[in-house]
């Protein structure tokens, strides 16, 4: 492995050296775009990988090597960055290395949210008890895989995109899965009630037991291992493995300790510059225009935009935000359930809604129109038209007028093969 020397700040500086902290999607993409001029620092022992596909590794569909990202041209230092010396423009690392930068990029990602459950942490404890697993890193995934065999009782806390993916993967491994969700429906941030119900039916068909509008109150630990999960109504679930899928929060401690402007995340402008002009931030840790995305597509778009800004070769001169589209495939022996959701899937008073349902084929398509603009939509089971719909939504342009027959302007998109 190639790595910077311990006193790397003595190396010649040409004003173009970029140090990237974080080997997730954003940091690795940026280092790939910058080539030899980028030094990548990351604490994970594994080669950089596509975090989006961790559920497929857990399900046994892919091996860890399959989701590795392409190697970066420049050096990579496997250690933890512990301090930023802004005056000397140095990154100090846990292994004693000091890495000099002209531009520093924070791509530190996010940490899983650990819910305040009674009994989760013993007094003075800093580590989770046995049997409890976050689901954020490759190490989390491999530990969870090693703990699950046929018939293992698993409780997944959290019914968002991550919780649904984890529950599906565990069920495919033969576990007896219970999924608890505090909100009234699964994936409530992305899906409307009808599409959420289709996801629920799909998971139920896999054998997953689902409890919505259900708050977990605490856990019971026996011999250092969580054996029971207590629900707010007093109901108790027996468990061998408990998965925390309660969301993520930006990993911004390094930036905060360095005195950068940190609110929900590390605050950046349209050039992804922090409050220090020599430091940028991208990905899950960054807060742009008051938004922390925590998703793959914005992370990659930010990395590409910043690469263009730093090299002067990209077509993008600034990052103006990302309109995110969620896609998920839930495999099943009877056929996969494909879904896509974007924008506002719930209509406001005065909005127009075009909705098509085919119970026989198990498809559901819906778009929400406000004035002459498409503001959101959700498709389940048939995604041929998703490209055209996403284009109409992302462009934010006026929709075509109604046809002579009086058909709604987007009906042809929902019933067509995607052509505009």
Image (spheres, grey):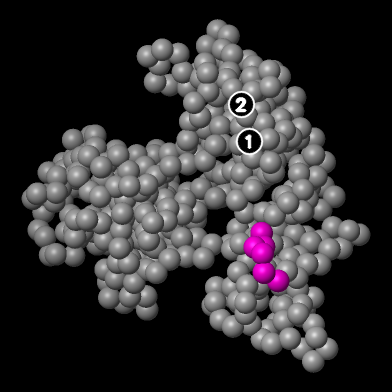
Q: Main secondary structure of the magenta part?
A: loop
Between 130 and 292, the residue placed more toward the observer is: 292
Q: Is 257 displayed left or right of 208 in the figure?
A: left
Q: Can residue 27 be seen at all in this image of the molecule?
A: no
Q: Quadrant of residue 237?
A: top right
Q: Can residue 400 be seen at all in this image of the molecule?
A: yes
Between 138 and 346, the residue placed more toward the observer is: 346
Q: Quadrant of the C terminus?
A: bottom right
Q: Is 234 displayed left or right of 325 in the figure?
A: right
| Callout 1: SS | loop
Check if residue 348 falls in the magenta segment.
yes
Q: Residue at x 37, y 78 (%)?
A: 315
Q: Are marks 2 and 1 in contact (CB under 8 Å)?
A: yes
| Callout 2: SS | strand
Q: Is 187 displayed left or right of 312 in the figure?
A: right
Q: Residue furthest bottom?
A: 404
Tag 1 residue: 182
Q: Which residues are magenta?
A: 346-352
Between 318 and 347, the residue placed more toward the observer is: 347
| Neighbourhood count class around disc 1 (C-alpha, 10 Å): few under 14, some 14–19, many 20 upward | some
User: Which mark, residue 335?
Assistant: none
Q: Give the percent coordinates (x, y) of residue 389.
A: 65, 73
Q: Residue at x 36, y 42 (%)?
A: 251
Q: Residue at x 25, y 56 (%)?
A: 274
First along the sequence among labels 2 and 1: 1
Check if residue 272 falls in the magenta segment.
no
Between 137 and 155, the residue placed more toward the observer is: 155
Q: Residue at x 80, y 82 (%)?
A: 407
Q: Is residue 157 above or below residue 398?
A: above
Q: Is residue 127 above or below residue 203?
A: above
Tag 2 residue: 216
């Amino acid at each position: 492995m190639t790595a910077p020397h311990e006193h790397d700040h003595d190396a010649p500086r040409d004003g173009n050296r970029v140090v990237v902290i974080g080997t997730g999607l954003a940091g690795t993409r940026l280092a790939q775009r910058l080539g030899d001029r980028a030094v990548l620092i990351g604490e994970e022992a594994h080669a950089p990988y596509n975090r989006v596909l961790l559920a497929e590794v857990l399900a046994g569909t892919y091996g860890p090597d399959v989701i590795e990202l392409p190697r970066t041209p420049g050096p990579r230092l496997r250690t933890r960055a512990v301090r930023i010396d802004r005056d000397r423009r140095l990154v100090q690392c846990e292994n004693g290395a000091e890495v000099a930068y002209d531009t520093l990029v924070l791509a530190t990602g996010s940490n899983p949210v650990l819910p305040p459950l009674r009994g989760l942490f013993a007094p003075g404890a800093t580590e989770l008890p046995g049997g409890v697993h976050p689901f954020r890193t490759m190490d989390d995934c491999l530990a969870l895989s090693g703990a699950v065999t046929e018939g293992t009782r698993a409780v997944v806390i959290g019914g968002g995109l991550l919780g649904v993916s984890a529950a599906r993967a565990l069920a495919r491994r033969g576990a007896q899965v219970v999924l608890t969700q505090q909100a009234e429906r699964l994936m409530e941030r992305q899906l409307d009630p009808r599409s959420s119900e289709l996801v629920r039916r799909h998971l139920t068909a896999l054998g997953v037991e689902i409890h919505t509008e259900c708050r977990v109150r605490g856990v019971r630990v026996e011999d250092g291992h969580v054996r029971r999960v207590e629900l707010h109504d007093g109901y108790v679930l027996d468990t061998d493995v408990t998965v925390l899928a309660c969301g993520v929060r930006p990993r911004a401690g390094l930036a905060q300790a360095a005195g950068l402007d940190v609110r929900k995340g590390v605050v950046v402008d349209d050039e992804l510059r922090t409050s220090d002009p020599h430091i940028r931030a991208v990905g899950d840790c960054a807060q742009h225009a008051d938004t922390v995305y925590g998703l793959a597509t914005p992370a990659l778009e930010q990395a590409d935009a910043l690469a263009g800004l730093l090299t002067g070769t990209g077509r993008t001169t600034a990052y103006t935000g990302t309109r995110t589209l969620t896609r998920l495939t839930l495999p099943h022996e009877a056929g996969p359930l494909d879904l896509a959701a974007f924008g506002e899937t719930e209509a406001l008073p005065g909005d127009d809604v075009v909705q098509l349902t085919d119970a026989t084929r198990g498809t559901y398509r819906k778009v929400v129109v406000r004035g002459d603009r498409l503001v959101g939509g959700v498709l389940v089971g048939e995604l041929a038209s998703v490209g055209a719909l996403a284009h109409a939504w992302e462009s934010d342009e006026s929709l075509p007028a109604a046809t002579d027959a009086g058909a709604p302007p987007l009906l042809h998109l929902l019933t067509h093969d995607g052509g505009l």
